[in-house]
Image: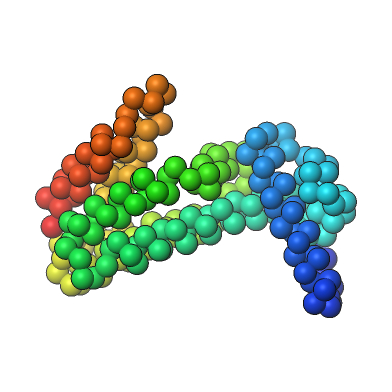
Amino acid sequence: MATPRATARTPGRRLRAEAKRTAILDAAEALFVSDGYELTSVDAISARAGVSKRTVYDHFGDKQTLFRSVLGRTNDAMVAAVREAIDEELADDRDIRDALLGFARRVTTEMFPTSGYATFRRLSSQAPVAPRLPEAVRDKPEQLVADRFAKFAADGKLQLTDPYRAMQHFIALTMRLALDVLDEDLAGEVGKPEILAILDDGVDTFLRAYG
């Protein structure tokens, strides 16, 4: 197995190396999404990135490591989006129902339709053929929500003993249900009002159990 090569670099060389690394990641992401992990070759990635095959190996070592790097980059973007939504929607000074509903609506109507989220789902769906991120990394967005639920419980806004299980119930009743409906809506007949109604019902059901 090849290993990434570490060398001392001047600032100019570091910038060029970083530009090549970004080009490789962008090319790999596009090909992994369009062709899948198994059918994507390092030769194709290097050609699309405009670098040599040796350069790809120098930066990432092998195709598995490159795929994990691509998946990790998209995961980091999702984590950042979820963290921002938590900070802005699940705020301490908001009514708990308004906070939960605002968060569910933001993730469902603003994050789910993005190309970044579509890329993340496409890459994640290629397991078990493709490498996966460590579980602790994969579950980070959910853990962020669970941590905020624990704070709500400490403040008396939610009644729960297991924040992670409560988070799982919340996501299942709201965002996952909405996403399942959207995935099944091949004719495009489900509109935003219907999705928002799903979220409203989900939040109310969650609060009947945990409010």
Q: How is the image coloured?
A: rainbow
Residue at 62% in and 47% down: 131
Specify whether 51 is left or right of 191: right
Q: Is residue 165 visible?
A: no
- Compared to 18, does 111 lie above or below? above
- Give the quarter of the image for residue 156: bottom left
Q: Residue furthest top?
A: 187
- x and y, in percent, of residue 44 in the image: 80, 40
- Give the quarter of the image for residue 90: bottom left
- x and y, in percent, of residue 6 in the image: 81, 70
- x and y, in percent, of residue 115 in the image: 53, 44
- Compared to 68, does 7 lie above or below? below
Residue at 34% in and 52% down: 106
Q: Is residue 38 visible?
A: yes
Q: Which of 200/140 is in front?
A: 200
- Give the quarter of the image for residue 139: bottom left
Residue at 58% in and 38% down: 126
Specify whether 70 is left or right of 204: right
- Compared to 145, does 107 lie above or below? above
Residue at 37% in and 50% down: 107
- x and y, in percent, of residue 35 in the image: 68, 34
Q: Which of 13/163 is in front?
A: 13
Specify whether 144 is left or right of 116: left
- Compared to 147, does 130 lie above or below? above
The quarter in which the C terminus is drawn is bottom left
The quarter in which the N terminus is drawn is bottom right
Q: Which of 169/92 is in front?
A: 92
